[in-house]
Amino acid sequence: MPRVLIIGAGGVGNVVAHKCAQVPEVFEKITLASRTVAKCEAIAQRIEEKLGREIAVAAVDADDRAQTAALIRKTDPNLVLNVALPYQDLSIMDACLETGVDYLDTANYEPPHVAKFEYHWQWAYQERYRKAGLTALLGSGFDPGVTNVFCAYAAKHLFDEIHTVDIVDCNAGDHGHPFATNFNPEINIREVTQRGKYWEGQWREIDAMSVSRDFDFPGVGSKKMYLLYHEELESLVKHFAPKGLKRIRFWMTFGQEYLTHLRVLQNVGMTRIDPVEFQGRSIVPIQFLKALLPDPGSLGKGYHGKTSIGCLIEGTKGKKKVRKLIYNICDHAECYAETGAQAVSYTTGVPAMIGAKMLLEERWRGPGVFNMEQFDPDPFMADLNRYGLPWQIEDRDRGIE
Ligand code: NDP
């Protein structure tokens, strides 16, 4: 009887729990655990009302490896889905190794005190997972996640050689708040305020938000997008550069309101990640800011508009130059009607469920630590169509300068 333990009951955890509950033939027993058990209970109650399925709940502090290992032993899962925060990745990977259970996450590890997300901490587990005969699947969200699988699909079916990849991520939705982040505020703000970086034979750094382009997003229209560093670039360079990749970049759209608020918050020091003394105690400004901002899991109601995320890929097929955009469009209101979540949580939670399904069905297997592009993209792509994230491919006349 396949059993899963989901850790993290935020916006993404809510979607993962709903989507796993929708597929009882694969996910027969589901336990949802998080630091605040009341959040797990609220999600479990919604799932019972909506789908008539009971899921178990538990409290855990996943920073504590021993506590996490004890919960894994108690619930005896085949797989742990980590949708808590990147800070917990290593302690949960350790607990999985200790208890002999496969691991999956959606975001790579970053240390709490340095805003630096890189795979080397998790790739360092390769030998230990391989020797234990366990699988760790890293980055099974949308980006990273689906974007990696889009690249693998393009390499398998659409191109002989891939030369450039531009990952283009647009959220054209409106949640009605002057400033809110669509996933964990602390992680989101750390990501967008760091220096930008892309790869063109070597890594090139730029000032944050200093390079922008207009792009015509399917289903959404023309939007200004900004060049950012994003974690899938690192694994895609590792796996595609030896096969002819010359350049890869990541772009994301931001509204003017968001950028203005962010600039002010940065200027006054509210995005700082180092502790400051306040009235005799030490606080981290970005953590205080998180407490004031809307919970991403609560943004769904009234959120309207769409996300449009894809990979614009150039290369060759036969003797011809080819340029293809592979993308998904997702509607905030439809996601809310189905799971009570907005589209950013939804587009992350669905691929986490599908990645877990790939492992439990043994379509994706192998001892060691894997990124998504290392497995056969076909069954994953078929399940995206089946479980709420249909994709399309179109030819494009123009690339991005
Ligand atoms: P939220 O902040 O909404 O939820 C995080 C959850 O993790 C909360 O339930 C929180 O508990 C729990 N948590 C935090 N620390 C611990 C801990 N020490 N032990 C146990 N539980 C803990 O975040 P999101 O749901 O928006 O995001 C979840 C993850 O998904 C993040 O890692 C994010 O980076 C990733 N993500 C990935 C994307 C992708 O496309 N690949 C896109 C969007 C997000 P509590 O309520 O007590 O704080």
Image (cartoon, helix red, strand yellow):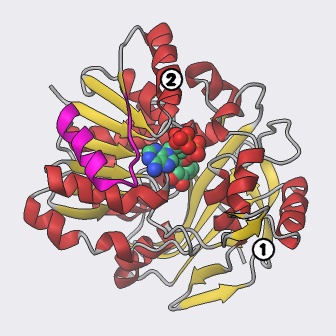
Q: Main secondary structure of the magenta part?
A: helix
Residue named by callout 1: 209
- The correct choice, above or below, for 219 with respect to 53 in the image is below
| Mark 2, secondary structure of its residue | helix
Percent position (x, y) of residue 41?
A: 47, 22
Q: Secondary structure at mark 1?
A: loop
Q: Is residue 232 above or below residue 319?
A: above
- Give the labeled residue for mark 2: 43
In this picture, residue 315 sits left or right of residue 27? right
Q: Which is closer to the viewer, label 1 or label 2?
A: 2
- Which region shows up in magenta? 58-75
Q: Depth check: 335 or 309 in front?
A: 335
Judge whether residue 72 is colored magenta. Answer: yes
Q: Quadrant of the C terminus?
A: bottom right
218 vs 351, left or right, is right
Whether label 1 touches label 2, CB < 8 Å = no
